[in-house]
Amino acid sequence: MNTETPINDTRKAELLSKQVEHIDIKSFDARPIVDAMKKMSFTSRDLGRATDIYNQMLSDPDCSVILVIAGSTSAGGCMDLYADLVKHNMVDAIVATGATIVDMDFFEALGHKHYQALEIPDDDTLRSLYIDRIYDTYIDEEKLQETDHTIGDIANSLEARPYSSREFIKEMGKWLQTHGKKDNSLVKLAYEHDVPIFCPAFVDSSAGFGLVKHQVDRMKEGKPYMVLDAIADFRELTNLKIKAGTTGLLMIGGGVPKNFTQDTVVCAEILGHDDVEVHKYAVQITVADVRDGACSSSTLQEAASWGKVSTALEQMVFAEATSVLPLLASDAYHRGHWKTRAKRAFGKMFD
């Protein structure tokens, strides 16, 4: 960090004065409004059907649920929502961006916060104050750099060998049990409940800076260093898919986490498992467009042509996720199918 120009601490404190408060899906019952929306049209009806499909995933005794997260919904107020899905056995594995896991959840687990932007001054002004902006949300860059160094410290404590992202994130959860300052951390709860977290592009996050520093420091010392094995990520998640059998996807956003998770079906076939099931259930909440041929990694209908997803029980919801995901999650929580679900504890299959 460049400290030649002193930071205006008064101005910085003024801008970082209103914390983002994460929504609590247990504090309200969304079932009546979701039931009413099912009788409407457009996005309301899409959300109603998506919620039905998610409830079917939870009520199907054979279905394992994979939560797929891209984008900044954790910073925007859904962090405790995701934690509750783990805590209440409503997801069995997670595939996410590194930013979701490190820059947002792990960041807050260290005691730091995200802030609502009460105003959005010139971004050069924000830079001079070491404030990072996610649309209308602020992060203290100085605290984020502390997070980078913490990731480096964890890497320094480990044996110098290859790790999958799942394996390294497990070490992060273990570290939080002793050093964390937030009980309701997704990383910590996933470790405690044996819910594996995969980040197929892990270094595309604050973790990358800490891990690069770890390697450079070790190189200077002439010592071996740890590395992340992206192929192991794909192999491990594919093995999880093979073991799980019937699977359902709850996808927030798209991109790498979405495509990575869907590709496990194809990878399993390449490994000789011709009987592997396509993902039986799938819900995607996204604002991405289909007209550029992408939709942040294809529509669910398009994915069916690749042999990844069934078209019978899938639903696209074109909406900004923080506006509809709390309704879906609260509805599922209060319908209570999670209360009788068998716990998969997939994390143990890698021990």
Image (spheres, grey):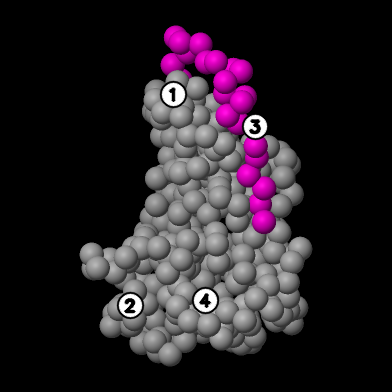
Q: Residue 281 at what x, y percent from top left?
A: 49, 82
Contact (CB < 8 A) between labels 1 and 3? no
Distance from disc 1 to disc 2, alpha carbons, whole Å, reads 43 Å
SS category of the residue bearing label 1: helix
Q: Quadrant of the C terminus?
A: bottom right
Q: Residue 222 at what x, y percent from top left?
A: 40, 26
User: Is 270 rendered above or below residue 78?
Assistant: below
Q: Which residue is disc 2 drawn over?
A: 303
Distance from disc 2 to disc 4, alpha carbons, whole Å, reads 24 Å
- Check residue 44 in the rendering and tell me which mark sits there, or answer none: 4
Q: Which label's residue is closer to the chain start, 1 or 4?
A: 4
Q: Which residues are magenta?
A: 1-23
Question: Is residue 6 covered in magenta?
Answer: yes
User: Is 124 rendered above or below residue 240?
Assistant: above
Contact (CB < 8 A) between labels 3 and 2? no
Question: Seen in the image, is 28 located left or right of residue 123?
Answer: right
Distance from disc 3 to disc 2, alpha carbons, whole Å, reads 44 Å
Q: Residue 90 at what x, y percent from top left?
A: 65, 72
Residue 17 is at least partly visible in this image: yes
Q: Quadrant of residue 335?
A: bottom right
Residue 215 is at least partly visible in this image: no
Q: Which residue is disc 3 drawn over?
A: 17
Q: Which residue is disc 1 drawn over?
A: 125
How crowded pointer 2 is (Cα within 10 Å; few <14, some 14-19, many 20+) is rated as: some
- Check residue 196 in the rendering and tell me which mark sits there, or answer none: none
Residue type pointed to by label 2: Ala
Residue type pointed to by label 1: Thr
Question: Is residue 213 covered in magenta?
Answer: no
